[in-house]
Amino acid sequence: MEENKETLELLRKIEKNSRMQTYSGYARTALVLVCAVCVVVLTCAVMKLMPQINAILGQAQDAVSQVGTVLDYLEQTSYQLSQVDLQGMVSNVDGLVTTGQQSLQATMDKLNGVDFDALNQAIKDLAAVIEPLANMTRAFGR
């Protein structure tokens, strides 16, 4: 009889274990179904977003090509700037300023050499001589 009790106890344990396995099977099946639904939903969402993603990728590709063009221009410009003789340009500008200063100084010396008092007196004398001629011309013109 003791063997029957042990066998009965063992059968109960096996039954309990089988029930737990069945419940865990149900839980796993439910989780797999939830995962499958999530995958389907995500796939639909990605498919809806694909045209937008393609458009964004196209714009990004255009932007990258424009950046490449700008970098090429920048490289050309920097090469041209590296070829410029800045020291020579500064020397030429310095020479030009010196020449301009010398010309200005010569002009100022000439202006300072002019006797403005004598020039003003000559203008007054000329006006005095021309005034009678102008009066005479007016008299004949009327």
Image (tube, rainbow, N blue to C red):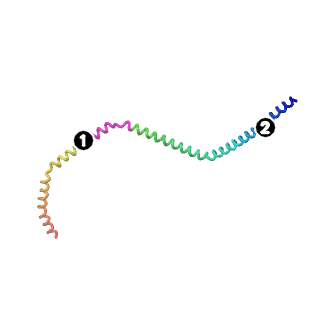
Residue pointed to by mark 1? 98
For this view, does 56 lie left or right of residue 141?
A: right
Residue at image position (14%, 54%) is 119
Q: Which residue lies furthest to the right in this view?
A: 1
Q: In which quarter of the image is the N terminus?
A: top right
- On the image, the x and y values in percent for residue 18 come to 79, 36
- On the image, the x and y values in percent for residue 9 come to 82, 32
Magenta-span inclusion, residue 6: no
- Spatial separation of the CA atoms under disc 2 and disc 1: 107 Å
Amino acid type assigned to the residue bearing label 1 in the image: Thr
- On the image, the x and y values in percent for residue 113 come to 15, 48
Query: Is 16 situated above or below 56?
Result: above
Magenta-span inclusion, residue 86: yes
Task: Give the magenta range.
Answer: 81-99
Marking on residue 38: none
Query: Is 92 situated above or below 132?
Result: above
- Rendered image quadrant of residue 117: bottom left
Residue pointed to by mark 2? 19
